[in-house]
Amino acid sequence: MPVKTYVSIPTDIDALQWDGTEERARELIEFTSGQEGFRHRDAFYVLEGAQRIGRTYTARLWVMANTDWLSLETGEWVARDSAGFYPIKADVFARKYREKFI
């Protein structure tokens, strides 16, 4: 079967960028419908045994599509569309999304 090329279907999203502040934590808790969707944490790291191997994460987001909590780094975006909430890395967000002016 030959390889085919696909284009992404435009989707409007609502989004807030996680900046690590208490004020933004409160906004994200409200945005994600309460404490059950967003949890602010002190910095924690991906560990392998006792050795730190990964990025610093400062929050967690419940993602219904994965039925799991996903870790957020400061600077990531929390997006909401018709399927629910999900994180987007800042560089991906900058390439894919522009603010919609009504």
Image: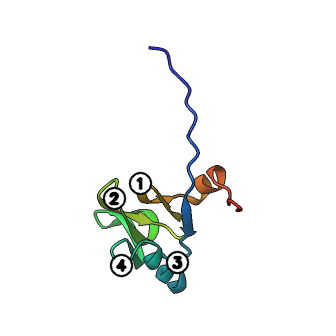
Residue at coordinates 59% horizontally, 52% vertically from top-left? 92
Give the percent coordinates (x, y) of residue 70: 37, 62
Instruction: From the viewer's side, name the closer residue of 31 and 50.
Output: 31
Question: Looking at the image, can residue 75 be seen?
Answer: no
Q: Image point 53% across, 72% down: which residue?
A: 18
What residue does disc 1 label? Answer: 83
* The quadrant where residue 14 appears: bottom right
Whether residue 38 can be seen here: yes
In three-dimensional space, the C-alpha distance between marks 1 and 3, rounded to whole angstroms, equals: 25 Å
Q: Residue 97, image x and y in percent?
A: 63, 54
The first of marks 2 and 1 along the sequence is 2
Instruction: Say which residue label 4 marks.
Output: 35
Q: Nearer the viewer, mark 1 or mark 4?
A: 1
Q: Secondary structure at mark 1?
A: loop
Taking depth in this image into account, of 19 and 9 the one nearest to the observer is 9
Frontmost of labels 3 and 4 is 4
Measured along the vertical axis of the image, is residue 8 above or below residue 90? above
Spatial separation of the CA atoms under disc 3 and disc 4: 16 Å
Element type at marker 4? loop
Answer yes or no: do the residues labelled 2 and 1 have beta carbons within 8 Å? Answer: yes
Q: Which mark is residue 64?
A: 2
> Which numbered disc flags the more N-terminal residue, 2 or 4?
4
- Provide residue 22's location: percent of width, then percent of height: 50, 85
Amino acid at the residue labelled 4: Gln
